[in-house]
Amino acid sequence: MTQVRYAARLGTFSGTMLVVGGIIGSGIFLSPSVVAQRVGTAPLTLAAWGLGAVVAILGGFVYAELGRRRPQAGGTYVYLRDAFGTFPAFLYGWALFLIMATGAMAAVAMTGANYLAELLQLGDGAGRPIAIALIVVLTVLNVLGVGIGATTGNVLTLLKLAAIAVLVVAALVLSPQHALPVAPLAAPIEAPHDVWSVVVAMGGALVPVLFSFGGWQQTNAVAEELVDPARTLPRALIFGVLIVAATYLLVNVAYLRALGVEGLAASRAPAADTMFVYLGPAGRTLITCGIVTSTIGFLSMVILMSARVYQAMAADGLFFRRMARLHPSWQTPVDALVAQGVVALLLLLSGTYGQLLDYVVFADWIFFGSTAASLFVLRARDRSPDGRAQLHPLGILTFIAAAVYVLVGSVQSNPGNAARGAGLLVLGIPVYLYWNRRRSRSGDVAT
């Protein structure tokens, strides 16, 4: 029987859109308020986003080299497996399947559904059914082929970029037409007064900043579905991260120009408030459409990319064997996509996804740092100078240091959530032992 393989159908444009769509979700519409609260001044607010952009660009270079060295479906799972063994690789896939991807799907679907229900004036209670429909429909589209899933994501990503462009142009070109719609904070924000307080404040601010920048690494999971992945993937990563970095900085300039740092810190919906200042209620409606598009586009990309990780795990004998199969006609991991959708729906219906996501935000950066470190191992093992990362080894070490910085900031800001997140990872240990024992008995080996 001929083995079914992934279809290499995606070029540089689709790869770049995967990167952009996988990063820009709802974070840039919500996180800037938190950042402004934590640093207290406009220059430090922009500095936090600029620093986040630098870290993301370094991460893009790191993952670009990893993609050149291992252009295989599964991305981060493959790099951790080949460098450090199946145990840390499994924990990454476990966290992704249990919470990080599925919880993000539930949270983003609910966010987009609530905005859509408000836009259509459907009333209370309409959000959850819409969110369920979004997860089901987008999962089905991704089941039917990577071309269909990627095209859907491409269109939604272009629409979200267009909406953001309108916001930025309005703030930079137009004059304010409406009064600031934001009530001031109960207590005024305080700017840090010395170097140490700046370091502490920036550490806290980088948590939401880098959370908003997260997602570029998932594109590596679809490497086998890119045309000439050793060339296409690095280009897509660098182009995509640069587009997002420029977008985020311009958006924050727009927010600060419209609202000021006090108004931004107090705003619960800075994008809508910014558009209201310049275009009134029509502007608020327009950006709400953009937020809906952004969240749905992000959801589509997460569904497409994450399922490839579970398929790679299953192919190694470390997950349900059915999830390793690719459909003979559609060439997609149907069982992995369906299982992922089911878990996301269960989290959505349980209402626990937001709390669970808080628990494992720090886990993302454990795996980011570990994956960057895997590049040292793979370099030594491959003994090949081809495709070296920019600024090696300084860039890789800087990225790892940033990951540690975020981890420390996450623990300091909420040690309880960090402890619970660690507990969720620990739960993966007996699961790994079970699957590894089954794998050993059946004679499967990691590929």
Image: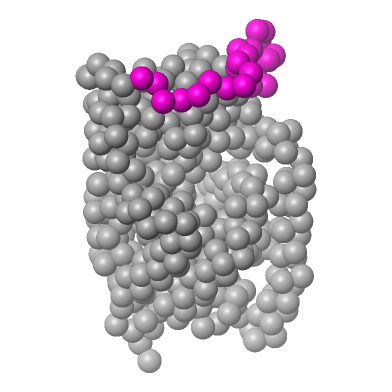
Residue 65 visible here: no
Which quadrant of the figure has residue 164?
top left
Q: Is residue 191 magenta?
A: yes
Which quadrant of the figure has residue 198?
top right
Q: Nearer the viewer, residue 288 or 75?
A: 288
Quadrant location of the N terminus? bottom left
Image height check: is 190 above or below 222?
A: above
Q: Measuring 24% from the left and 50% from the top, which residue is drawn there?
A: 13
Q: In the image, is 24 to the left or to the right of 309?
A: left
Q: In the image, is 285 to the left or to the right of 424?
A: left
Q: Measuring 57% from the left and 67% from the top, which residue is drawn there?
A: 349
Q: Is residue 341 magenta?
A: no
Residue 283 visible here: yes
Image height check: is 30 above or below 33?
A: below
In this rendering, the count of numbered labels is 0
Residue range (magenta): 179-202
Q: Measuring 60% from the left and 60% from the top, which residue is drawn there?
A: 351
Q: Nearer the viewer, residue 69 or 329?
A: 329
x, y percent for residue 274: 36, 27
Q: Main secondary structure of the magenta part?
A: loop
x, y percent for residue 196: 69, 14
What colouring method underlies this structural image? one colour
Q: In the image, is 159 to the left or to the right of 333?
A: left
x, y percent for residue 357: 61, 52
Q: Measuring 55% from the left and 75% from the top, which residue is drawn there?
A: 314
x, y percent for residue 95: 62, 59
Q: Nearer the viewer, residue 164 or 113?
A: 113
Image height check: is 416 above or below 438?
A: above
* Farthest bottom residue in view: 1
* Farthest top residue in view: 193
Q: In the image, is 91 to the left or to the right of 139?
A: right
